[in-house]
C-alpha cells in the first residue's frame, strides 16, 4: 500500500463514489469475515523468533559457546533463518531468507553444494537491509544437502540444510488424467502490492486442475471447478471447464511442469481469463498424488478482471491499492495488471473432470457459477479466482437476470 494512501485517497470524493465497489474487491481479496489479515505481499514482517539461537550458538546449551573473545557489539546478529539449520524439507525452487537484528546489507552470504563448490546466488536486501533473500542461480537440486555461510564480524557462521524430494518423480508414475484440487489459501501475493489474504473464507467451490495429457515433452492442462465435501470431491457442472491454452511452450522436466509464451487463457466461471507474457510452474509430488508450489505470473487483462468482478471499474479499484498497477498491455490492446502469485498446493482427487461448455451451461436452471463474492454456505476451500486476483477465489451461484 503506498504511503499516505489511507487518508488522502479514502477521503477524496472519487473514492467515496467508488467505496461500494472497493469494498466488494476488498471482500474478495481480504476475506469473508473480520479474521486477522495476513499480509502476503511485499514487505513482510520478520517471522516470529523461536526463542533459541538459530545457529545453535546458545549459552543455554551449557557449553559456554557464546563466551568467546569475539566482540559482537555493534554487529547485527541473525534473528531467523528459512530454511533453518537441519531442515530436510526446503523446496528446491524457493529462495533462502536470512533475517538480522539490524541493518546488515552487504554481509557476505555464500551457499555451497555437497561437492563443496560455491552455488551462484543473487542476494536481494529488503526491509531496511535487515532481511536478505538469497536466490540460487540456477535453482537448487531436490533431495540435496547444502551449506550456508554468513560472515558476521570476524567469525563467519555456517549451517546445513537439505532440500526435500519434491522435484523428483518416482519411476513408473503416470500423470495423464490425474485431477488435483488446489488449496490456494496459503498463496503469497507478490503483485499487485497491498493485497492480502484471510484464513477465514466460506467459498462455494474449489479449483480443479487436470493433467490431461503428458507428451514428449508437452503437457495439456484442463481447469474446472469442484466441491470438496470432507475429502469427497465432485465437479461443478455449472462452471465452465476446459483446457488452459497457452500460446507458447508448456512442458514437463522431471516433476516440474512449466511454460510461458505470449498468452495464457482459461475459463473461470463466466469469465475468460487472459494473461499476457505468462509464466506457469508447479511440481508434481514424487508419487503423483499432489502438486506443490504452483506459481503464476503475467499481465492480467483488465477486461478479464471486469468480467470476474462483474464491474467496469476493476482498474480503478486495483489502482487504489497499488497506484499505477494498470498499464498498457504488452501484447494486446487495452490495460493489464501485473499479477504474481506463489505457493499454491493441491491434492489428488478421484474426480473425473468433464468438459463443460456453453450448451451444458445453458442447461443449468440457476445459470452458470459466477465468481462474484463471498459465499454464505460455510464450505471451506479456495477457487481459481486465486490465480487471477489475489490468492483466494470466492464463488457462488447467481440466477440469470
Image (tube, rainbow, N blue to C red):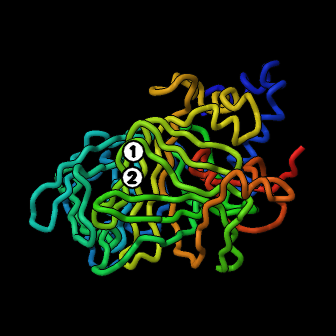
Q: Residues within 10 Å of mark 2 (few under 14, many from 20)?
A: many
Camera-side residue of 158 and 207: 207
Numbered mark located on residue 309 in the image: none
Q: Residue at x 47, y 35 (%)?
A: 276
Percent x, y of residue 150: 23, 54
Give SS at disc 1. loop
User: Which residue is most to the front?
Assistant: 359
N-term-proximal mark, 2 vs 1 = 2
User: Which residue lies under the disc numbered 1?
Assistant: 130
Where is 20 relative to 232, above or below? Answer: above
Nearer to me, 233 or 83? 233
- Image quadrant where residue 216 sits: bottom left
- Count of all numbered marks drawn on residues in the image: 2
Please rate how many residues cluster around mark 1, counting C-alpha atoms within 10 Å: few if below 14, some from 14 to 19, many from 20: many
Can residue 87 be seen from the camera position used here?
A: no
Q: Which residue is at a point 35% across and 67% down the rendered structure image?
A: 90
Horizontal and vertical percent position of residue 303: 64, 32
Q: Residue at x 65, y 37 (%)?
A: 305
Q: Which residue is mark 2?
A: 99
Q: Are marks 2 and 1 in contact (CB under 8 Å)?
A: yes
Q: Quadrant of the N terminus?
A: top right
42 is higher (above) or lower (below) than 197: above
Give percent across and percent down for residue 219. Answer: 38, 59
Comparing 209 with 190, the one in front is 209
* Label 2 residue SS: strand
Amino acid at each position: 500500500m503506498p504511503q499516505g494512501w489511507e487518508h488522502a485517497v479514502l477521503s477524496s470524493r472519487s473514492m467515496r463514489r467508488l467505496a461500494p465497489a472497493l469494498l466488494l474487491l476488498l471482500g474478495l481479496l481480504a476475506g469473508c469475515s473480520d479474521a486477522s489479515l495476513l499480509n502476503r505481499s511485499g514487505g513482510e514482517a520478520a517471522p516470529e523468533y523461536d526463542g533459541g539461537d538459530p545457529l545453535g550458538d546458545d549459552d543455554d546449551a551449557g557449553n559456554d559457546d557464546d563466551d568467546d573473545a569475539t566482540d559482537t557489539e555493534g554487529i547485527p546478529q541473525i534473528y531467523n533463518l528459512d530454511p533453518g539449520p537441519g531442515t530436510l524439507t526446503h523446496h528446491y525452487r524457493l529462495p533462502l531468507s536470512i533475517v538480522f537484528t539490524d541493518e546488515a546489507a552487504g554481509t557476505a552470504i555464500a551457499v555451497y553444494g555437497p561437492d563443496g563448490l560455491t552455488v551462484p546466488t543473487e542476494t536481494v536486501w529488503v526491509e531496511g537491509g535487515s532481511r536478505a533473500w538469497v536466490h540460487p542461480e540456477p535453482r537448487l537440486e531436490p533431495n540435496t544437502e547444502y551449506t550456508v555461510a554468513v560472515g558476521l564480524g570476524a567469525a563467519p557462521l555456517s549451517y546445513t540444510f537439505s532440500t526435500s524430494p519434491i522435484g523428483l518423480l518416482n519411476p513408473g508414475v503416470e500423470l495423464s488424467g490425474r485431477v488435483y484440487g488446489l488449496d490456494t489459501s496459503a498463496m503469497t501475493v507478490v503483485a499487485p502490492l497491498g493485497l492480502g489474504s484471510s484464513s477465514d473464507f466460506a467459498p462455494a467451490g474449489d479449483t480443479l486442475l487436470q493433467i490431461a495429457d503428458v507428451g514428449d515433452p508437452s503437457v495439456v492442462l484442463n481447469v474446472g471447478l469442484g466441491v470438496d465435501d470432507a475429502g469427497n470431491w465432485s465437479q461443478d457442472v455449472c462452471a465452465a471447464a476446459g483446457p488452459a491454452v497457452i500460446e507458447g511452450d508448456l512442458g514437463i522436466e522431471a516433476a516440474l511442469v512449466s511454460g510461458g509464451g505470449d498468452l495464457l487463457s482459461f475459463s473461470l466461471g463466466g469469465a475468460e481469463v487472459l494473461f499476457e507474457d505468462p509464466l506457469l510452474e508447479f511440481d508434481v509430488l514424487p508419487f503423483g498424488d499432489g502438486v506443490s508450489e504452483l506459481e503464476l505470473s503475467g499481465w492480467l487483462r483488465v477486461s478479464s478482471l471486469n468480467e470476474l468482478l462483474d464491474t467496469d471499474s476493476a482498474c480503478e479499484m486495483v489502482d487504489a491499492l497499488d497506484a499505477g498497477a494498470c498499464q498498457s498491455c504488452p501484447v494486446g490492446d487495452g490495460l493489464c495488471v501485473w499479477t504474481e502469485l506463489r505457493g499454491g498446493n493441491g491434492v489428488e482427487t478421484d474426480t473425473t473432470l468433464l468438459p463443460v461448455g456453453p450448451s451444458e451451461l445453458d442447461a443449468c436452471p440457476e445459470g452458470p457459477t459466477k465468481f462474484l463474492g463471498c459465499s454464505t454456505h460455510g464450505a471451506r476451500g479456495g477457487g481459481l479466482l486465486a490465480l487471477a486476483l489475489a490468492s483466494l477465489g470466492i464463488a457462488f451461484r447467481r440466477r440469470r437476470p
